[in-house]
Image (cartoon, rainbow, N blue to C red):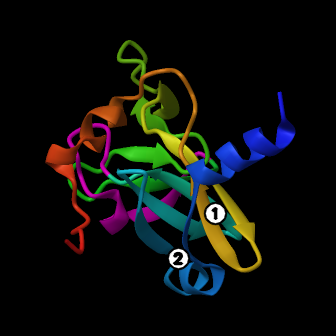
């Protein structure tokens, strides 16, 4: 296998979505990467990208607030307040043991629900590469054309 060919193929899958200075100022941006709408966040010095629509009911995550829960930075869906970790795409919820009246709620994971994507920075540009993970994420359902929120220029 020729390494130049595989590098070139990889570059074609990576899309420049904007300038580092712009996302640092706004702390988020939206983009379409190979037909898939994503939101890119800049939070606590790190970049994160995920599908733009919430896995639960298609809420617009680019309009949500970022909050920390159980030591994890999460985007909170503005529609139903679902919490999604920026780093892994896990859905978080609070659980309590109903048989223990003195129990305190604890944070638990629903597993990966939101597809996250790879963000790289090169020469002041922000690039997104779509996830290659073979498993199906709940957010995949809302990544289809029927639910698009970013207006195309055509």
- From the viewer's perspective, tell me whether residue 19 is left or right of residue 104: right
- From the viewer's perspective, tell me whether residue 148 is left or right of residue 52: left
Magenta-drawn segment: 53-70
Mark 2 or mark 1, which has the lower sequence index?
Answer: 2
Q: What element does badge 2 sit on?
A: loop
Residue 104 image position (x, y, % from top left): 48, 33
Q: Are marks 2 and 1 in contact (CB under 8 Å)?
A: no
Mark number displayed over residue 33: none
**Residue of label 2:** 27
- From the viewer's perspective, tell me whether residue 48 is left or right of residue 144: right
| Residue 118 makes an appearance in the image | no
Classify residue 33 by image quadrant.
bottom left
Q: Is residue 98 above or below residue 35?
A: above
Give the crowd class for mark 2: few <14, some 14-19, many >=20 residues within 10 Å: some
Q: Is residue 59 above or below residue 106?
A: below
In the image, residue 66 lies in the stretch drawn in magenta: yes
Q: Residue furthest top?
A: 99
Out of 101 and 121, give the one closest to the viewer.
121
Give me the C-alpha separation between circle 2 and circle 1. 9 Å
Q: Image quadrant for the N terminus?
A: top right
Mark number displayed over residue 47: 1
Q: Residue at x 43, y 17 (%)?
A: 100
In the image, residue 87 lies in the stretch drawn in magenta: no
| Residue 94 makes an appearance in the image | yes
């Amino acid at each position: 296998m020729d390494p130049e060919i595989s590098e070139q193929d990889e570059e074609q899958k990576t899309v420049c979505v904007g300038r580092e200075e712009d996302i640092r100022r706004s702390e988020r941006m939206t983009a379409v990467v190979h037909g898939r709408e994503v939101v890119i966040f800049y939070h606590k010095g790190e970049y994160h990208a995920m599908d733009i629509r919430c896995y639960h009911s298609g809420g617009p995550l680019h309009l949500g607030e970022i909050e920390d829960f159980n030591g994890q930075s999460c985007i909170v869906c503005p529609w139903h307040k679902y919490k999604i970790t920026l780093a892994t795409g896990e859905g978080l919820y609070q659980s309590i043991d109903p048989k223990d009246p003195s129990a305190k709620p604890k944070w638990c994971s629903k597993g990966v629900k939101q597809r996250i994507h790879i963000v790289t920075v090169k020469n002041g540009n922000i690039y997104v590469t779509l996830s290659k993970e073979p498993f199906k994420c709940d957010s995949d359902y809302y990544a289809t054309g029927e639910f698009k929120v970013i207006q195309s220029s055509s």
